[in-house]
Image: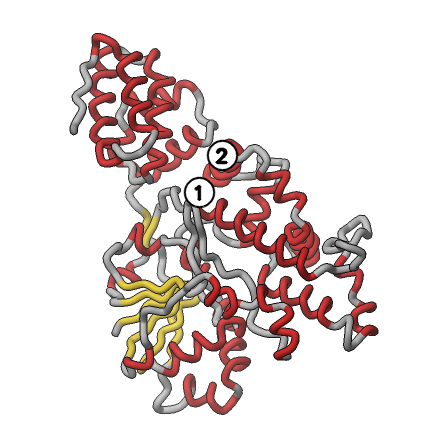
Amino acid sequence: MKLLVIGNGFDLAHGLKTSYSDFLNICIGEDLTNLNEQEKYISNFIHSKDTTFRKKMQANPWVRFFVKRKKIGKNWVDFEKEIKRVCEIVSSEKEDINFFNANLNILMDNRGDYLFTKNGHIADIDFMKVKLKELIEMLNFYLYQLENLPIECYYLQIMSFAPTHIINFNYTSTFLKYYRSNINIDFVHGKTGKDTNSIVLGFDTLNSQEKDVEFAEFLKYFQMVNNDIEMNVHLNNFDDNQTIIFGHSLDKNDEDIIKNIIDKSSKITLIYHSDGHKIQMIKNLIDIYGKLKFNELCLSINKKIYFEKQGIPIEFNTKVKEINELFLKIVGRGATKEEKIKFFKEKKYIDLKTSEENWFILAFYFLETAKELPGHLIKEIGSDFLKKLEPFQSNPMYENIINKFENIVNRNFVIKRSH
């Protein structure tokens, strides 16, 4: 079996803003002037979908805690490690009051108020659980919007490897959308969805059975079972896997799955994007296996772990890139009137690769722009959009779009409905 293992670095390498820091910056930042077109689009689109989203984000105690830790961590934060940090402090109250008191400041916001206080408790565990669930729902909402964006590059390392199975630590479906859709894939941490999601966001253990039971909802393996996540790939049945790991740092939080993957592979290629990333992967391997096993895997005659620098991304041609950028400006409401007219007049949408939802958004923008276009062009563009929208006739917006086309085009354009 040719196995590809992908982590969040895979999405980041394709230009998608899927890091936890991106989530915080785009969703709660008040100043949007420093955002690029993709980030502006996401921020505006999310706000248009749910005008209370930013307020809910700003009120969530976990988000407020992450923002505080992000400032300490030089604009970077690891949600999973920070969730564990909070749970370790809260769980110590009964057995190590000195440790608990010494770390109370971590549970405070910048004003000195306790973030997770409820019902007279400095940190109420049930309240923490409810707000974690709320956080996961907001993260899912964000990532689902992000999945609709087009990517601008791909990697020959992935294409030439031609995997037969994917183990995906991400919540997104980037590989399925842009490389190959008909392939076996396991979303080991769950996946984003429009109406429901199975996102896993937690940590491994508190190293105490009693504590693990009390804080079960924060544990990855509890969430995986509770969210009905199944591993379709039975690694125990394969002892000669050729494996590439792309975009995963091999963090100890995922130790059980990582060890199973490595132990059942005859050769593992670890793709790293920088010297710092390579060093971190080596440290994490030592942390997982210890010196002796690490030497056997990486230094012995029979070693099976190899490192390879991440290749240069192959960008889609300039024309497609320009179209993507203009598209993002239009749907992000950042395009000028002239840019919108040019987009439709020159039919730049023809080569666009995007989602069902975005085609309907573009159709509405065309209707707004149509009055600036000559009648014959309205007819041509209208025909183009009907072809683009035809596969989505079950969408509730379809009839609405058709009726609007009929009204605005009037006698210039006879719409042929397919039944």
Percent across and percent down for residue 27 are: 57, 42
Name which quarter of the figure residue 316 lies in.
top left
Residue type at tag 2: Lys
Q: What secondary structure is found at the residue carrying circle 2?
A: helix
Image quarter where the N terminus lies is bottom left
Residue holding disc 1 = 145
Q: Position of residue 229 (x, y in %)?
A: 41, 64
Q: Earlier in the sequence, mark 1 or mark 2?
A: 2
- Side (left or right) of 362 relative to 195: left
Q: Report whether 362 appears left or right of 71.
A: left
- Crowd band around label 2 with a 10 angstrom C-alpha radius: few (<14), some (14–19), many (20+): few
- Callout 1 amino acid: Gln
184 or 43: which is nearer to us?
184
Rendered position, 162 above or below 192: below
Residue that lies at the very extreme toward the front in this rendered image: 119
Q: Position of residue 272 (x, y in %)?
A: 43, 67
Q: Quadrant of the C terminus?
A: top left
In the rendered view, tell whether residue 381 sits above or below residue 200: above
Q: How is the image coloured?
A: secondary structure
Q: Position of residue 168 (x, y in %)?
A: 39, 63
Are the residues flagged by discs 1 and 2 in contact, CB closer than 8 Å?
A: yes
The residue under the point 67% across, 66% down is 87
Asked if 341 appears above or below 362 in the picture, the reply is above
Residues packed near mark 1 inside 10 Å, few (<14), some (14 to 19) or many (20 plus)? some
Comparing 103 with 417, the one in front is 417
Q: Residue at x 45, y 63 (%)?
A: 189
Query: Residue at 32% of width from left, 75% of height from top?
Result: 234
